[in-house]
Image (cartoon, rainbow, N blue to C red):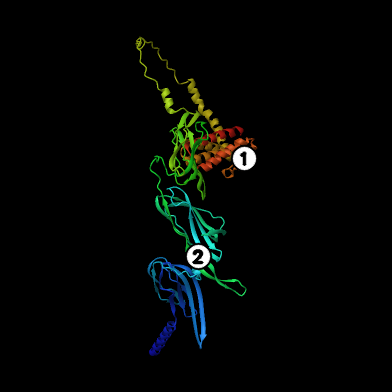
Amino acid sequence: MKMIKFYILTILVLFTHVIFAQVEFKTAVSKSKLGVNQRFRIEFTVNKQGADNFKPPSFVNFKVVGGPSSSVNQSWINGKASYSQAYIYIIEPKEIGEFTIESATIEYKDELINSNAVKITVTEEVEIPKDPNNPDYIAQQSIHLVAEVSKLNPYVGEGIYVVYKLYVSENINLYGSQISETPQYKGFWNQDIEVKQVNFKSGQFNGENYKYVILKKAILIPQRSGKLVIEPIEMNFSVGIPTGRGDFFGNMITRNINYSTKSAAKDVNVKALPEEGKPIDFSGAVGEFDFIVLADKNILKANEAAQINVEVSGSGNLKLFEIPKITTPAELEVYTPEHKEEVATSLAGLRGSISDAYTVVPQFKGKYKIPEVAFSYFSIKERKYKTITSEAIIVNVTEGKELPSAINNSNNTGKKQVVSNDNNFRFITLNTTFEPVVEEEFFKSTLFYLLLLLPFLAIPIGIFIGKKRAKRAGDTFGNKIRKADKLARKYLSQANKQLGNQEAFYIALEKALHNFLKAKLHIETSDISQEKIAEILKGKSVEVATIEEFISVLNNCDFARYTPTTSVMMKQDFEKAKNVITKIDKYL
């Protein structure tokens, strides 16, 4: 019995081996030695029907320019059937050297089968025969990728542009295209310009008629001197090449091929900015600019805000340098400036303006000078540095507290010399008069009888007060109103103490406003809304302006907890809250 099982197992193993020995999965190439500028065909062929899940190798050091395509060949000759299926790629090498294309894999009856690996030798570029009937040669002569650069020797910081165009001969048909490699701009600041319509137009290339389309536009600003390279753009195409033969109806027969090409790399020699005459405050601005520093108002009151705008406008590398900063006296509180950029990008470069808007709040009465501000840039037209200096700004604060130093100076007085006279020293009087103290007895005195009657008077007063308290304790609604009023005063006082502590201040101020509403309008916190408040206050004949002012203060409390603010702004909000509470209280 054991021998029978051994024979059966042996037969099955041999049968399986015979079956899989008949499966052939081969790799074949059209050429194993070629120039780096040539392409070759690689086929992976399996001879068994039912093989699937084909996986190609990774093609390291090679680029796929065509495929995969598939072909099936099946025949029956002299009673013998044959079958083959091929997976075909067109590839080209990326560099010179000896390389191995690893095995492809395919599955047949749940078994993974590998093809053979092949070795490819890649040499330097070879001369390709110019066969006028060769489809690749025709495509090469009919499709051109061109990079047009506005200037090849700019200064550092000077804007140039590059435009990529595709020229296609009218003698071939272009069925499809795809960008395979996008250009790199190492050493440049760059920004793409939107190409809104990708439509072919008629034009000329090398004196011949072509169709062309603009693929890509970009502004480039070199960031360092020396040689910089604008790398090429590379594309794959599906092209219909005419064969020179016509069909039955006289239409030209074309042959469809896959073709790829790229634009030429462009060398840009960037000149360094001259050191001669370079201002100390030069921050890298290159172009043609104007510079202004303006205040929206020069006369104001203490704690009233003014805005000072510092703006650079014109054309050049507007996004690549810093705007000069203003210097202000210590008595002016200055907030972080709001930066704005209104810059348009076109083939003419960057044009527009950039600005910093400073909010300035004076603390004391007086006149303050904001010194002149200088802006330096390198002019491309004049090829030299230029400096624009703004005028000084005088801020006149007409109302407010006096400067502490001025107050101290007015209060300080010089030392006075003491002048002696006859009245400086007085003698102590030695003669005195004394009178005896008469003591009055407490018993049966007026105070004695008042203290005796006091307990009898306290009893009815205590009963009266107790009834009042009981009545008040039973008045739930009234107690709520009184408690809310007390809390409003408490939180208002707490807000005053928290001035400078943003979150705690606005929380306390908001609670004070809510409790004031509860006390005066008899509404609950859950019912407090802008519409409800406005409706009730209108019913109490409160002016619309006062209602809007109260709602504005409520909104400020809500927003200011999450946005930057200052002690001055908190003080203003506190005063607004007190004033509007006082106004509404008069109506109610």
| Badge 2 element | helix
Quadrant position of the C terminus in the picture = top right
Up the image or down, 347 lies above or below 236; here it is above
Residue 521: % across, % down: 60, 38
Q: Nearer the viewer, residue 377 or 496?
A: 377
Few, some or many C-alpha atoms within 10 Å of disc 1 (few <14, some 14-19, many ≥20)? Answer: some
| Residue 262 coordinates in the image, percent (x, y) | 47, 62
Tell me the residue that label 1 is attached to: 534
Residue at 59 percent across and 44 percent down: it is 527
Q: Is residue 424 above or below residue 196?
A: above
Camera-nearest residue between 12 and 386 = 386
Residue ID for mark 2: 141
User: Which amino acid type is marked by label 1?
Assistant: Ala
Residue at left offset 49%, top offset 29%: 396
For the residue pair 288 and 523, the one nearer the viewer reads as 288
Whether 135 is drawn above or below 215: the answer is below
Disc 2 to disc 1, C-alpha distance? 80 Å
Number of on-image labels = 2
Q: Secondary structure at mark 1?
A: helix
Q: Which amino acid type corresponds to the residue marked 2 in the rendered image?
A: Gln
Please give left or right for residue 274 compared with residue 258 in the image.
left
User: Which of marks 1 and 2 precedes in the sequence?
Assistant: 2
Q: Is 566 placed above or below 253 here?
A: above
